[in-house]
Image (cartoon, grey):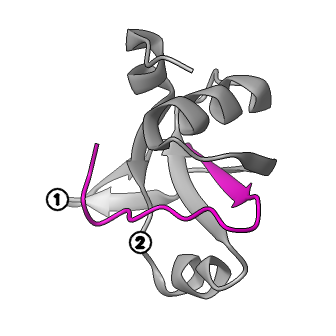
């Protein structure tokens, strides 16, 4: 599958946290994705950008928290995450970038 410019719009960045490291043992990787992206679009983007076969895509939307900034209340943006599970034998090195 060839890489298209739209694929770079779907995946914003990889998420590297303690939980994301734990799920990587199960051959799953976590990415922040665009809020309007669908599961098939995420699957196509990951397969094209990283040359791997995707087994499943699970998504979650984390609502932004209300925080105070310089004494005034503000709201952080909502974030959509994609948990991408790969087929056996495939792996992604998220530290190298695209």
Residue drawn at x 64%, y 21% is 36
Residue drawn at x 68%, y 54% is 84
Q: Magenta stretch: give its range.
A: 79-98
Closer to the eye: label 2 or 1: 2
Say which residue label 2 marks.
16
From the image, which quarter does the C terminus lie in?
Answer: top left
Secondary element type, mark 2? loop
Residue drawn at x 56%, y 39% is 46
The mark nearer the N terminus, 2 or 1, is 2
Secondary element type, mark 1? loop
Q: Residue furthest front?
A: 89
Is residue 83 shown above or below 51?
A: below
**Classed neighbour count for the residue bearing mark 1: other residues with Cα under 10 Å, few (<14), some (14–19), many (≥20):** few
Between 1 and 74, the one lying in front of the other is: 1
The answer to whether one can see residue 75 in this image is no
From the image, which quarter does the N terminus lie in?
Answer: top right
Left or right, 76 with reference to 43: left
Residue 70 is labelled as: 1
Left or right, 22 with reference to 32: right
Residue 23 point in image, percent of width and height: 66, 79
Residue drawn at x 71%, y 58% is 86
Between 35 and 8, the one lying in front of the other is: 8
Between 39 and 60, the one lying in front of the other is: 39
Residue 80 point in image, percent of width and height: 61, 44
The answer to whether one can see residue 42 in this image is yes
Residue 9 is labelled as: none
Question: Picture quarter containing residue 40?
Answer: top right
> How far apart, in angstroms, are the residues tagged by discs 2 and 1?
29 Å
Labels in figure, total: 2
Q: Is residue 19 magenta?
A: no
Is residue 37 shown above or below 12?
A: above
């Amino acid at each position: 599958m060839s890489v298209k410019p739209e694929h770079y719009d779907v995946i914003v960045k990889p998420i590297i946290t303690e939980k994301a490291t734990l799920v990587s043992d199960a051959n799953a990787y976590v990415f922040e994705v665009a809020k309007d992206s669908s599961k098939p679009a995420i699957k196509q983007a990951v397969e094209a950008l990283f040359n791997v076969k995707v087994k499943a895509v699970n998504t979650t939307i984390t609502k932004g928290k209300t925080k105070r900034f310089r004494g005034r209340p503000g709201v952080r943006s909502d974030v959509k995450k994609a948990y991408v599970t790969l087929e056996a034998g495939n792996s992604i090195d998220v530290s190298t970038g695209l």
